[in-house]
Image: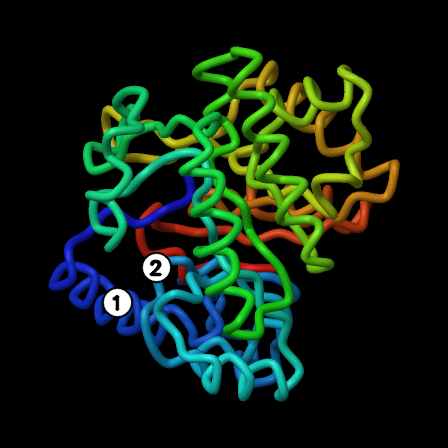
Amino acid sequence: MYKIKLNSFLKFLMLILCIIGCFLFGACGRMAGTDDVDIASESFEYGAFQGLTEDLEQLDSYKTVVIDAQYFSSDEIKRFRDAGHKVFSYINVGSLEDFRPYYNAYEDLALGSYEHWDEEVWINVADDRWQSFILNDLAKELLDKGIDGFFVDNCDVYYVYPEDDVLNGLSVIMKGLASSGKEVIINGGNCFLDAYCNAGGRWNEVITGINQESVFSTILWDSNEFGASSEEDREYFIDYVKRYGDQGADIYLLEYTTDEALIKEIDRFCAEHGYKYYVSDDIECDMSEND
């Protein structure tokens, strides 16, 4: 789910608005109401900025970041990493976005529409063409940029299409990414990962960590607002991350809220379990409250 759906002009406009907002609320992403905090002295463990298209230096306060490395040169990423940062690149393996330059080449592999994201379709991960493109072209391009690892989105295609060929196709892709020797964070993907392990696979064959969205928070799509997750959803996703976290997987939470009390609850939970988190106040901007 973690993505930006904007044309080039709107992306630029949103970036400017986000930067302005971050200066208003604090350059390191603190929400309004934290004026007593010395922003310049703060650093954060984790930040997710897939919508950022320029100026990595504005993320200097973050030790580990998620970006879309397609928008940055290898020199830019090297300078940022040399300054002590870890860089994961977003890679979308389970769906196809119409703003990508390779959209026309693979739109015939579409499985169906993607709810809430009109500019995107689920993709047939079982197709050899798609697997080859992801592993031999797209992943290689990102690796050549000098990234530390992959942030893999939309393995939830298996949740939408729970079929053996989809499971097998995702397994090929995820094993291929892991074979690079780089870290691999799966965004969500609980149905795939559980099915893979239940079929006899080992989690560390395909991932090194999990990023789970909306454990404590939820997005109210009809009203474009945030809320607290249901007790059932919270328990389900806590069980998911703890189950693999207790086995050694790195755990990250990505939450969407402006509720200070909820943010404190997220902070306490992650501190107790040794997890990292990022809290966004905008599902499209992704530059806000952090750990």
| Residue 145 in view here | yes
Q: Nearer the viewer, mark 2 or mark 1?
A: 2
Name the disc covering residue 51, or none. Answer: 2
User: In the rendered view, does 280 fall on the left or right side of 88?
Assistant: left
Name the disc covering residue 15, or none. Answer: 1
User: In the rendered view, does 285 fall on the left or right side of 251?
Assistant: left
Q: How many marks?
A: 2
- Looking at the image, which residue is at 33% across and 76% down? 54
Q: Quick one: label 1, few (<14), some, or many (20+) residues within 10 Å?
A: many
Instruction: Classify 174 as above or below 56.
Output: above
Type of colouring: rainbow
The kind of secondary structure element at disc 2 is: loop
User: In the rendered view, does 276 fall on the left or right side of 200?
Assistant: left
Q: Amino acid at mark 2?
A: Gly
- Looking at the image, which residue is at 72% across and 33% down? 241
Residue 188 x, y percent position in the rendering: 57, 34
Q: Amino acid at mark 1?
A: Leu
Q: Quick one: label 2, few (<14), some, or many (20+) residues within 10 Å?
A: many
Instruction: Classify 261 as above or below 143.
Output: above
Find the residue positioned furthest to the right.
247
Residue 6 x, y percent position in the rendering: 19, 51
Q: CA distance from mark 2 to mark 1?
A: 8 Å
- Looking at the image, which residue is at 40% across and 26% down? 124
| Residue 265 in view here | no
**Which quadrant is home to the N terminus?**
top left
**Which quadrant is home to the C terminus?**
bottom right
